[in-house]
Image (cartoon, coloured by chain):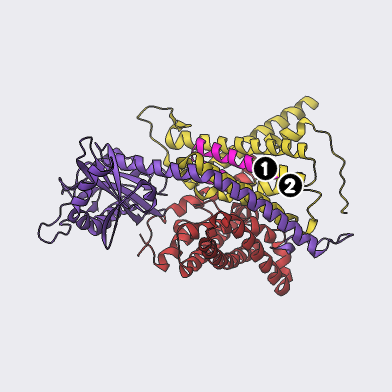
Chain colours: A purple, B red, C yellow
Amino acid sequence: MNETSAPTIPEQVMPSPFRLIATLGLIAMLSGFVIVLVYQITAEPIARNQREALERAVFTVLPGAESRALFRADETGITLLTDEELAQANVFAGYDNQGQLVGVALTGSARGYGGEVRVLYGYDPAAEKIIGYTVLQSSETPGLGDKIEDDPNFLANFEALEVSLDPETGEVAQPIVTVKEGAKTEPWEIDGISGATVSSEAVGRALRESTLEWLPRVVSHLDVFKQAAGEDH
Amino acid sequence: MAPDSLGFIFLNAFLINNFVLALFLGLCPFMGVSGKIKTAAPMGAAVTFVMLVASSCAFGINRLLVRFDIEYLRLIAYIAVIASAVQLVEMTIKKFSPTLFRMLGIFLPLITTNCAILGMALFQTFLEYSFIQSLVYSLGAGAGFSLALILMAGMREKLDLANVPDACMGTAAALMIAGLLSLAFMGFAGLGG
Amino acid sequence: MAADPRQPKPLTRQTLTEGLWKENPVFVMLLGLCPALAVSNTAINALAMGLASTFVLLGSSLLISLLRNFIPKQVRIASYIIIIATFVTAVDYIIHALSLELYNALGAFIQLIVVNCAILGRAEAFASKNPVRHSLVNGFGMGAGFTLALVMVGAVREILGFGSLFGVALFGEQFQTWAVFILPPGGFFVLSFWLVLFAVVAKRRAAKEVAHGS
């Protein structure tokens, strides 16, 4: 610790170094105690808040879904997770009230104007379309870049954004691209926001990279998602 | 430019998200020492140096905190490191340049409570930069802080000679200039995008 | 022991009110400007930031005032910073637990309360020299003054930049928002505007008093 940080004004009695260190040590212990206490008390509500925010987001991007299941997708395949393993989940499947698969929700991220933009999107494998989108985290400029969160015209892009897979190779046929506002002509293009070009392009990039990487894997394991519907809901 | 490239990280901290003019960090010394270019330049250099030291220390400490799963002590650990780093810089300057030491006066110890430095340490942690990236980030942040300080000082020196309405004298006028500078810096948006 | 003139001054109304207006940390002392500008783009953010800072101010004033005779002069700044950092960490977790949305809006600025000069300034200038009751009252006044200033800046920025106040839309659909006010430059402009307004009012009042006096 920095005992020397106080100005060295000459004093009548200079306390011993031991007393200085003891004081700082005592205060540090007290502070450690308080912090650990608060940490313990708040850990549960914080985890709950985060869980609830994520659940809300999953149901936003999968319109019509009534229940959901958690999965982890990696190199080895796709595994079903329990609710306690939420932190490891990176794929979410939503089911309607008959237990039919509505779609899967995946995350994507890209560097925007003010930092990382993380989005969650819902993909309907039957229609081969993105059917919903929400921003999980962004620090885009308020009033300009943060329009990617609530601009109605921009959000309309993600009601049915085509991402079809090539039947032969299983890869994405037409990668998503962001175009200038009003210039959208193809179903896989995103109509950008003028005045928020960097941010809307970041969204497009996040979706493109995530779909290129994950969709082929997800679609080839569709049975895993369909099967999970009967198990725990 | 790739968003993780060193060039972009530097540019981002230096101009696009300038610590003073876009993130509002380090306003106290910005308002306090920006009266004259002669003090503004060494202050900027001192802050940059402290930032570099604090950045590398913060990186190491964060590794330790994560390793032992005690991240809730991060704030306290960082502030202690920064206070010590400032002390170090103060002693160095006092030893090598007593004139400079007198000129910077009370603002040297105040670097401890300069939010730009703690902010830089916290941001580099949130952004999960590697060691080299952290160093470049802190260098950019320090350079950006110095640039803002020197630009501001240049304008305030001119302002001293201008005929300003009474009510706007002093801080109000300085804030207005800062606002205009900040507006100008908004123009760096998307640079290197 | 250190020569510490510990004549507890009587607890007066001044102890409370000086922080509210006469020595308002933002408008008069120009302390704690960073959070005052950085998170004041809406009135709600400003209010939350003000309350969080007030909580830290009260907590640290209480503890520092309690320990004022125990902490040696040489390590006082280090001790104060540890105490303040403790309360800030606590506030950080509490806000995170209360509302994720608010936590995301305030971002790193909650943790940056620790370097808010207004709080360290209070610790050094008041809490370390005065009894607990005085320190609490004074800290409360200062906190209230800080909150007031933040909300005043935040309200103007939100009205002009979003066309709303505390999230409630004030104008019709056709209101063209003035985006510059929620961007960084707007923060500087609005604070500057308030300072000019106060200077003008103070000048008017002084002129009136002179006129009455003569």
Pinpoint residue B51: horizontal percent, then vertical percent.
57, 64
Which tag, 2 or 1, sits closer to the chain's start?
A: 1
- As drawn, which residue projects farthest toward the top? C212
Are callouts 2 and 1 both on one chain? yes
Badge 1 density bin: few <14, some 14–19, many ≥20, Cα 10 Å = some
Image-quadrant location for residue B193: bottom left
Work out which quarter of the rendered image holds the C terminus of chain A and state it: top left
Q: Which residue is mark 1?
A: C59
Pinpoint residue B115: horizontal percent, then vertical percent.
59, 54
- Any mark on residue A25, and which? none
- Any mark on residue C64, and which? 2
- What's under tag 1, amino acid-wise? Gly
What is the chain identity of the residue bearing mark 1?
Answer: C
Frontmost residue, A54 versus A180: A54
Q: Is residue B66 left or right of residue C86?
A: left
Q: What separation in Å lies between label 2 and label 1 (alpha carbons)? A: 9 Å
Q: Is residue A220 above or below residue C214?
A: below
What residue is drawn where x is 47% and y is 33%?
A: C159
Q: Is label 1 in a helix, a strand or a loop?
A: helix
Is residue A231 rendered magenta in the image? no
Q: Is label 2 in a helix, a strand or a loop?
A: helix
Frontmost residue, B109 versus A100: A100
Magenta highlight range: C34-60
- As drawn, which residue projects farthest toward the front? A231
What is the chain identity of the residue bearing mark 2?
Answer: C
Frontmost residue, A44 versus C97: A44
- What's under tag 2, amino acid-wise? Ile
Visible in this render: residue C39?
Answer: no
What residue is drawn where x is 64% and y is 35%?
A: C144
Pinpoint residue C52: horizontal percent, then vertical percent.
59, 41
